[in-house]
Image (tube, helix red, strand yellow):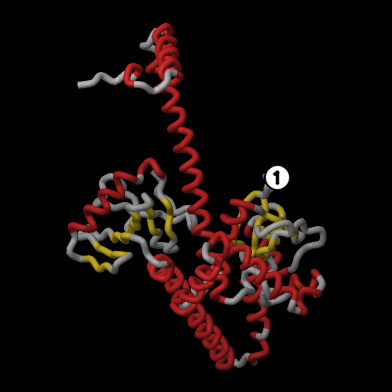
């Protein structure tokens, strides 16, 4: 049983209320579809639980939900807090707007509040430095390089380390969100993910030296691009959009994001449309003709990039990739279940035949053929009349 969030790698904590599933401080469950999630309290994202630990835990969650008096519920979603402190979210058959409000409202709202606090603290610190410098006799011009250094530090921050399809290590910096984007497929309604990155895994000291002293001659970190398809694109896009949406979104933006997915009919159908929007925004921008050197130094994202789309579109992409990743996982579980069932059926058939002589099998087969070939008449009726 896992105890770490698959998204932020934070500890999911434990509970003592659900003996069958003692992981997490907030559990969400859907009894009709057989789904159980652990909600990470650090990043507020929903971790789908393994199939083999799910069914008994869902029944236990249902019993605990019904037994507590501290609960609120609509026709589709209910929320209950147990005395032990565990929070249960029961999902019925909700419309997407209501489900998204429960699932993503806390997540995006918390990011938004955190971003506002960080921005406020940065402005306050900047003001204090300027006032302190003035009192000490320094001119404001002496601090002119501070904003540029802070912006460079922000753009050069490492957000993800992984390996490409060849197994080679790569790293994705925040500035790569300014140019990476969804791209529509040329030969169909699908989509893929265009990701800019740097080769290798540099040490933190190397990145710090690059921020303040510039890239040394022959530095191996030349920007490269890869195209990711299929389930890998869904998973990677979800991770990158969490960083692109670090400022979260207001309730109105969440509603608009949900409306975009509803207009498409399904998350799977929405993502190709999002790729088309990204391509259209890029083609309408003059920045698409910029030189690589100029793009490397730009302080704002390209239109149509993961970080350059409208807020509601970015939120919708993150929602859709999460739901598609879960659907892929469930389809994989179903295939595995079917394979296990076929294997069990084959073993059962072999076990049954071990106790039946071959002559009996032949006799039964001959009798079935004879009865099927015989004309229907009272004398040929094998059933005994009472």
- Report the residue at 32% width, 52% height from top: 31
Q: In the depicted view, which residue is nearer to us: 367 or 254?
A: 367
Q: Residues within 10 Å of mark 1 (few under 14, many from 20)?
A: few
Direction from residue 117 to residue 21 in the image, left or right:
left
Direction from residue 188 to residue 84 in the image, left or right:
left
> Residue 43: x and y, percent?
44, 63
- Report the residue at 74% width, 78% height from top: 284
On the image, which quarter does residue 286 sit in?
bottom right
> Residue 290: x and y, percent?
80, 74
Q: How many marks?
A: 1
Residue 117 visible in the current orientation: no
> Residue 117: x and y, percent?
46, 78
On the image, which quarter does residue 78 sit in?
bottom left
Q: In the depicted view, which residue is nearer to us: 111 or 238?
A: 238
For the C terminus, the image quarter is: top left
Q: Secondary structure at mark 1?
A: loop
- Report the residue at 67% width, 85% height from top: 144
Residue on which disc 1 sits:
166
């Amino acid at each position: 049983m896992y105890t770490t969030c698959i998204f932020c790698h934070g500890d999911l904590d434990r509970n003592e209320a659900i003996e069958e599933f003692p992981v997490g401080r907030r559990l969400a469950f859907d009894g009709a579809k057989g789904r159980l999630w652990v909600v990470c309290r650090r990043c507020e994202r929903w971790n789908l639980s393994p199939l083999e630990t799910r069914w008994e835990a869902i029944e236990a969650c249902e019993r605990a939900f019904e037994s507590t008096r501290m609960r609120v519920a609509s026709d589709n979603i209910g929320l209950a807090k147990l005395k032990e402190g565990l929070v249960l979210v029961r999902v019925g058959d909700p419309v997407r707007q209501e489900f998204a409000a429960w699932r993503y409202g806390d997540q995006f709202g918390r990011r938004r509040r955190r971003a506002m606090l960080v921005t406020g603290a940065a402005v306050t610190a900047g003001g204090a430095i300027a006032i302190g410098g003035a009192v000490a006799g320094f001119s404001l011009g002496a601090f002119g390089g501070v904003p540029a250094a802070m912006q460079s530090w922000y753009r050069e921050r490492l957000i993800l380390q992984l390996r490409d399809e060849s197994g080679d290590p790569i790293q994705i910096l925040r500035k790569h969100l300014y140019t990476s984007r969804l791209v529509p497929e040329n030969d169909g309604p699908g989509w893929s993910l265009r990701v800019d990155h740097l080769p290798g895994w540099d040490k933190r000291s190397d990145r710090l030296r690059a921020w303040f002293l510039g890239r040394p001659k022959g530095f191996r970190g030349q920007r490269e691009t890869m195209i990711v398809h299929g389930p890998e694109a869904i998973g990677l896009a979800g991770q990158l959009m969490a960083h692109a949406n670090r400022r979260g979104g207001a309730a109105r933006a969440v509603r608009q994001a949900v409306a975009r997915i509803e207009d498409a009919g399904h998350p799977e159908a929405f993502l190709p449309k999002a790729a088309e929007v990204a391509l259209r925004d890029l083609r309408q921008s003059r920045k698409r003709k910029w030189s690589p050197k100029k793009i490397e130094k730009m302080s704002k994202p390209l239109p149509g990039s993961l970080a350059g789309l409208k807020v509601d579109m970015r939120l919708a992409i993150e929602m859709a990739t999460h739901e598609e990743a879960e659907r892929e996982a469930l389809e994989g579980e179903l295939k595995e279940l079917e394979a296990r069932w076929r294997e069990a059926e084959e073993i059962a058939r072999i076990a049954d035949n071990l106790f039946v002589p071959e002559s009996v099998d032949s006799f039964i087969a001959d009798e079935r053929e004879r009865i099927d070939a015989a004309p229907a008449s009272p004398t040929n009726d094998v059933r005994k009349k009472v």
